[in-house]
Amino acid sequence: MLTMLIITAVEMLIWIHIFNKDKIFGTMYILMVLYCVMPSFARYIDNSYTNTISHVVISDTEILTSYNLYCALFLVSMAFFFEIMQRRTVLDLKIRVPHYRIKRYGKYIYWCIHVIMSLFLIVLYIRYRNLMSYQNQSVVKSNILWFIALEYVFVFVLIDFFLMQRSQKKMAYIIMMSSVLIPAIMTCIRIGNRGILLASVIGILYVSLEYYDIKIGLKDLKKFIKPSLIIVVIIMASQFVRYNRGNTEGIGLESSMITDLFKIRTIVFQDYTYPGNSLMYLMSKDMINTGFVFKSNVKNFVFFLDEPTIAEYLSINYIAPGEWFGIGGFLPTEAYLLSGWLGIIIIPMVICLAYRFYYSLFKYSNDKKFKLFFGFLITTFVSMSLVRGQSFILFKSLYMYFLPSVLLYKLANSSGLKKSKD
């Protein structure tokens, strides 16, 4: 336990260093730390209970030691490649976003899309409200357009917020934001899905931290007040959804939602507790399947090709065959399944190369709000999904989320994206 605490403390110091340099990568890094350390803490607190809820039985302490070492080296490797990519002489792509002006009809097109999006979410919620539940999430997830629309909600909200800042018609923008936000929140609560909204709110938290230029240190303690309120909202919203999962009698509030936040078991045994156990399983079986990792990533990169993810492959075939249980994706698991201990170099390097590419897309823009917007896209559509997913998300996000979102931003602003002259 002491060794685990020391490793966590070191990783937190590394995170502070990264966060003060780059808040986007820092957000991704702290999520990775969280998902790495919590499964280990859960084993130390109550191993038998963790065996039950994760469907992964671990009794050998050497497996847990190997897990801690693997995750620690994985995180150090991420930090190392991040430092290399930060140097201007290394992979400075100098990519410029194409500059097309849409002066005349851009905003009209944007608002038409916005209205269609609002009506789509409202109508579907009203139509399927009584069918939605935690046990029946397929009502939403089987409808690909509906599920993707939910993921795009905060893209519209953030664009509307930026537009509202320079408009006198504040109420009109608040109504438009509410028209997509309210049905989306209600839908996610009904199906007990925290992931969709949580990822977006983490993106909003990043925007707040970047906007106020907050760094971790004594000088910026006062600046942490507003972001801290956002963190509290995130935690409370997450608890609210968690406690109403599977509740067929209606949505309700309970005092235990707040009191349980002060219990160690409640903090440790959350959604981030399960994914790391898949790595422990691989280590206990000494399992490597390089071919499947390549096939899964390549086929899942293409939208219409249906191939099991690594998490599905392990859950269905090994960890919980024949049961309604998904252990969740975990990047170090992908790294180990790909090439064992060599994976701690390969996957972090891929992550940092992809991040450098995305970073180059907005680094040279003079539009400060666009930089915030693009940072929001990375923290929302990559950070959370990547930490509990696998590496194809780095590339699939480009055509699934980034390009359409940038187009919406350009349409809404109707004057294109400014480029630097250098």
Image (cartoon, grey):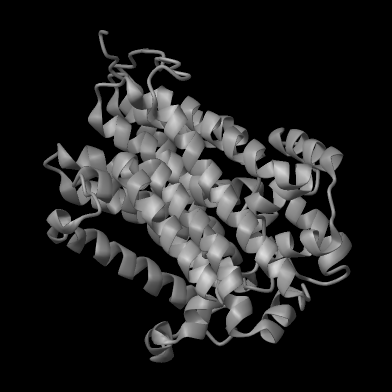
Lateral position of residue 167 relative to residue 173, left or right: left
Image point (34%, 44%), residue name: 23
Residue drawn at 71 percent across, 74 percent down:
61
Q: Is residue 122 visible?
A: no
The answer to whether 134 appears left or right of 181 in the picture is right
Q: Position of residue 42 (x, y in %)?
A: 59, 77
Residue 348 position in % (x across, y down): 58, 40
The residue lying furthest to the top in this view is 422
Q: Position of residue 321 (x, y in %)?
A: 87, 68
Give me the residue at 46% from left, 48% from top: 28
Locate the C terminus by quadrant: top left
Q: Nearer the viewer, residue 89 or 51?
A: 89
- Up the image or down, 52 lies above or below 64; here it is below
From this viewpoint, is residue 401 visible?
yes
Task: Tell how many labels.
Answer: 0
x and y, in percent, of residue 217 in the image: 21, 55
> Is residue 307 toward the left or the right of residue 160 in the image?
right
Please identify the quadrant where the N terminus is shown.
bottom right
Please tell me which residue is depicted at 19% across the width and 51% down the height of the picture.
171
